[in-house]
Each structure stands twice: as C-alpha cells, then as structure tokens.
C-alpha cells in the first residue's frame, strides 16, 4: 500500500496513538488502513469412498491437484463460501457437512477452513479455474502432485482418521511460508 | 475505496474478466483491490466456575460488557490472536484451550472465533480499551448489558452446555446487521 484509498495521498507507515503495530496511515485525511488475514474456504467433497479433487488451471501450482477452495467473499458465511467455490471450480453441488479442519498460515496471513461435504450427484466437471475434476479413492490420491501442503495435511489426516473410523475436527498451523 | 492504493489513481467498480463480482479495479495500473471478511478472535477466560468479562472503554457499545476479542492481525495464528487480545484488554494471561464457537456475521463481513481458555492466575485488570475487568459466575453475568449479540449467544450456549456437563463446538450465523 502506497496511497490512501480514501483520498489518494501518499500514506506513511507508523504506529497510531494507542496502537502497538505500524499501520499505513494517511497524514491528509487521517484514515488508518488496517491489513488483516484472509480466509480461504473449501471442502472435502465425498461420494461413497471417493473424494473429489480439481486440477488447477491457474497459477500458483498450475496442473497440480487440490480441493475446491478459495477466498471467502464479503456477505457470505463460511459454508456458503465453501459451496460457492465447489460450484465454481468443479461445477459440483454439495450438502455442506461438519467443519473438519482449520489451518493457520501465519507467514502468508491466511486462515484455511475446510468442511466435509457430500456430493449431491455425479454431475460435475471443470470450472474455468480447473483443467480436470475427478473422484479418487484413497489409493488413487495423487499425493506427489497435490498443489499445497495445506491440502496434503488435512487429506492425510482425513484418510488416517477414516481408516480408524473416527473423523474429528482439528486446528493446525503450517509454519512455512510456502504452502 | 475511491483511490488505487498502489498508484493513487481513481478506481472504478466493475466485474473483472473471468470474475463474477464487482471489484475496485485501477484502470491505470490494473491492480484489482479485493475486499474480504475479517476475523475477530477472542476467548472465554475461565477461573473455576467464573468467567472473565471486560467493560468496554471504547465505542461501539462503550460501557457494556464483552469477552476479550478483537481483529486478528497478520502473522499470527487464531489462538495467538485470542491470547493477545486477552492480554491487551484484560492484562490477563491464559492457557488457550479448545475452539468453542465460530459465528458468521455476513452483513458486516466478519467471522468471530472463540476459544475456551483457562486463566493462569488472578493477576488481571483493565487494559487501555477496558473500563473494568471482572470475574462473573453464571448468576452474575450482566445479560442486559452485554455489548453484542455475538457475545450473548456463545455465552448463553456456554452456560447451558456447562449445566448439562457437555461443552461442544458450534458454528452459528448472526443474520442481523446489528451485532
């Protein structure tokens, strides 16, 4: 951030009175421009013993496999956002289930939120951000070509827990800058 | 948002190519300025059968009681943010426990995340944003002077569940614009 989005003046980086962190502050109009973490919402779409993955058509990690997920939008709930992303990326309609995992990614200022979800039917296919959309059994998961650690970790946990017959909510933190 | 924070030019509101929602777009430098929900993190600090509340020294709802909570900052985890807010608002140190509740507030583009937490000692007191900090038993909770519905709802649930001997995680949505 270089310019004030309210009045167009150059901003300065300083600790406002009563605050503890440096913020972008406009000396002209006084607006303080806070920057906060963003939420990524997605789901694990289930169909019997299979789950749905999308092959990314866009950078980063173009060509690699991922769960349907993306930035939460204003005016929606977490579950609505996860359903919207699933529709956009996989043209898939789901019943959104329980919250399954939350991952902090403090190095890139994101919080990723995953639900379990049940596919309503097999009428799906790649949206504009996907090259391919497919169902995978555990044995078929392309572990070596998953796009992000924040996808690999909950999926590994999901199949481990499923084998043990008990799926439970989990909060994790991915400490690397790279996802 | 009126001006591009990257180059200072007036932004226009339009749907970028390949997108579905109107965004603030800079015609001069091309940057798309996305706006996304913010996360508020807090906790229910417990001491035996009491919980800690803070009386707000600032607007909105100055003078009313609330749980320690505030906007999550970049570079921290949810639990770190909740602990930081508890220290800032109540000078209280806690052991952060399980996630207790998440509330969507889609009308004001926020997601509120509450943990249970255990006070480490009774060495607490009002921070700069609080007029008073006190421990309350269930009978003493000032239900009529709680600051926000997003505080009242998880607290009501917390005491209901505690009486039944089973505290469980919950996602809710507060549909009003007013909190």
Image (cartoon, coloured by chain):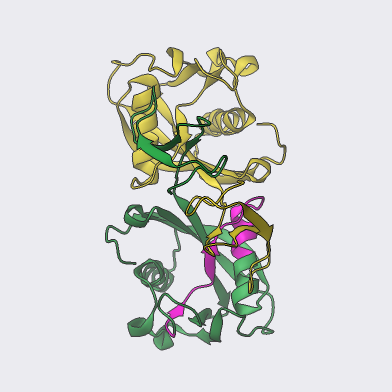
Chain colours: A green, B yellow
Q: How far across and how far down the image is residue A10, in percent?
A: 45, 42
Q: Looking at the image, can residue B135 be seen?
A: no
Quarter of the figure with residue A167: bottom left
Q: How far across and how far down the image is residue A11, in percent?
A: 43, 40
Q: Is residue B147 above or below residue B24?
A: above
Q: How far across and how far down the image is residue A154, in percent?
A: 40, 66
Nearest to the observer: residue A142 or residue A110: A110
Determine the residue positioned at 33% across, 84% down: A144
Q: Quadrant of the C terminus of chain A?
A: bottom left
Q: Is residue A176 left or right of residue B174?
A: left
The residue stretch that appears in magenta: A63-83
Q: Looking at the image, can residue A166 be seen?
A: yes
Q: How many marks?
A: 0
Q: Is residue A22 above or below residue B53?
A: below
Determine the residue positioned at 51% across, 33% down: A31
Quarter of the figure with residue B82: top left
Q: Is residue A81 left or right of residue B119?
A: right
Determine the residue positioned at 56% across, 12% down: B63
Q: How far across and how far down the image is residue B45, in percent?
A: 40, 27
In magenta segment, residue A75: yes
Q: Is residue B84 left or right of residue B49?
A: left
In magenta segment, residue B26: no
Nearest to the observer: residue B165 or residue B49: B49
Q: Is residue B143 above or below residue A145?
A: above
């Amino acid at each position: 951030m270089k310019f004030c989005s309210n009045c167009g003046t150059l901003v300065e980086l300083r600790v406002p009175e009563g605050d503890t962190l440096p913020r972008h502050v406009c000396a002209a109009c006084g607006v303080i421009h806070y920057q906060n973490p963003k939420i990524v919402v997605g789901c694990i779409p289930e169909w019997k013993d299979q789950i749905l993955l999308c092959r990314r058509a866009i950078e980063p990690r173009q060509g690699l496999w991922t769960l349907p997920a993306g930035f939460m939008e204003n005016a929606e709930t977490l579950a609505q956002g996860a359903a919207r992303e699933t529709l956009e990326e996989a043209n898939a309609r789901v019943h959104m289930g329980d919250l399954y995992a939350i991952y902090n990614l403090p190095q890139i200022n994101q919080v990723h939120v995953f639900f379990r979800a049940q596919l309503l039917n097999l009428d799906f296919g790649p949206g504009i951000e996907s090259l391919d959309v497919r169902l995978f059994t555990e044995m078929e998961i392309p572990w070596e070509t998953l796009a992000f650690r924040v996808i690999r970790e909950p999926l590994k946990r999901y199949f481990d827990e499923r084998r043990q017959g008990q799926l439970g909510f989990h909060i994790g933190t991915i400490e690397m800058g790279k996802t």
